[in-house]
Amino acid sequence: MTIEGVIEFFKSTFSYHSIVTIGYFFVCFGVFILNVVFNNKITKLFQIRRGSFLNPMNYIRLVTSGVCHADFQHFRNNFIFILLLGPILEERFGSFVFLEMILITTVASSLFHLLFYESSAIGASDVVYMMVVLCGIVCSFDGRIPITFVLLFLFFVFEEIVKMFFHKKNDSVGHDGHVIGAICGIVFGYHLFL
């Protein structure tokens, strides 16, 4: 079979309709593989951490921290939600707006973490929480607050708020990122949908 035959087979068999969602998956998966190959050096380079305002890499890390994951379980847990919810939101809002939402959420979460915490941070959990909350909001058909959003907030986000402020144990989970992601989802839902 020729290369053209393989390409034609994939084109006729698979749908590549959610280019941002799938692209985000492959970028994060590629970074994960590179991180394994280079013994966590990629994560150390890309994770957000406090540093000099004069170092341009610190500005780049506001985004790159969202493509790194600590291990396969971390990557898998985030992308189960992203691959499930991403195509719904990308179809609803368009690829460009959806990409903007991912980038804004990642930067907002990174900035919040830098302002209030001294530890480094990585992962796409903030984007997951943004997507979950935003999907709960876009279920509304008449402009009123959907019950699904309220339930999602109570069962998915409220626990993170409690852990962010009252959880003393260092569990290496970025509860602040989850909360900031949820807030971004609310803001996007209000401005783009309601």
Image: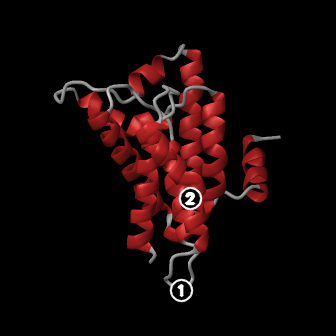
- Residue 72 coordinates in the image, percent (x, y): 65, 29
Q: Residue at x 44, y 49 (%)?
A: 179
Disc on the earlier residue, 2 or 1? 1
Query: Which structural element holds mark 1?
Result: loop
Q: How is the image coloured?
A: secondary structure
Query: Which structural element holds mark 2?
Result: helix
Q: CA distance from mark 2 to mark 1?
A: 22 Å
| Numbered badge on residue 142 | 1
Q: Outermost residue toward the left? A: 54
Residue 50 shows up from this direction: yes
Q: Residues within 10 Å of mark 1 (few under 14, many from 20)?
A: few
Between residue 108 and residue 100, name the one nearer to us: 108
Q: Residue at x 36, y 30 (%)?
A: 48
Between residue 194 and residue 98, name the one nearer to us: 194
Residue 18 shows up from this direction: no
Indicate the quadrant containing the C terminus: top left, top right, bottom left or bottom right: bottom left
Q: Which residue is mark 2?
A: 154
- Residue 148 coordinates in the image, percent (x, y): 61, 69
What amino acid is at disc 1? Asp
Between residue 20 and residue 189, name the one nearer to us: 189
